[in-house]
Amino acid sequence: MAKGKDVRVTVILECTNCVRTGLNKESRGVSRYITQKNRHNTPSRLELRKFCPYCYKHTIHGEIKK
């Protein structure tokens, strides 16, 4: 039995506040989280509010390409 594309895929969420250049200069790095999403339920890019240890606050983390 051959399987098609996996329904559940692993995605990487990256802080959108740390990525912007010139906005947060005191940031030491970029916060990233690894999670899974269901491709059928959420075909668009995933965005979640997560805690960023570099910004010291909850920010929007968006899905990035591998």
Image (spheres, rainbow, N blue to C red):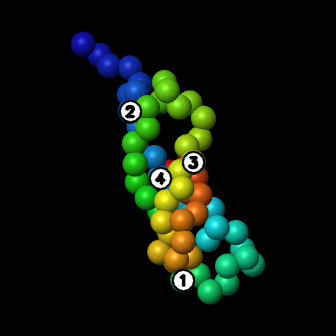
Gap between marks 1 and 2 measured at Cα: 32 Å
52 vs 1, left or right, is right
10 Å neighbourhood of mark 2: few (<14), some, or many (≥20)? Answer: few
Location of residue 35 in the rendering, given as x and y in whole percent from the top left corner = 40, 48
Circle number at residue 12:
4
Q: Nearer the viewer, residue 44 or 65?
A: 44
The structure residue drawn at horizontal position 40% and vertical position 54%, both measured from the top left corner, is: 34
Q: Are marks 3 and 1 in contact (CB under 8 Å)?
A: no
Residue 47 image offset from top left, x and y in percent: 57, 48
Which amino acid type is shown beneath numbered disc 1?
A: Arg
Residue at the spot of label 3: 47
Of 6 and 15, nearer the camera is 15
**Mark 4 or mark 1, which is nearer the start of the sequence?**
4
Q: Which mark is residue 8?
A: 2
Which mark is on residue 28?
1
Q: What kind of element bears circle 1?
A: loop
Mark 4 belongs to which amino acid?
Answer: Ile
Looking at the rendered structure, the kind of residue marked 3 is: Glu
User: Are there few (<14), some (14-19), or many (20+) residues within 10 Å of tag 4?
Assistant: some
Distance of mark 1 from mark 4, alpha carbons? 19 Å
The label shown at residue 10 is: none
Give yes or no for contact between labels 1 and 2 (Cβ–Cβ under 8 Å).
Answer: no
Give the label, 3 or 1, closer to the camera.
Answer: 3
Q: CA distance from mark 3 to mark 1?
A: 22 Å
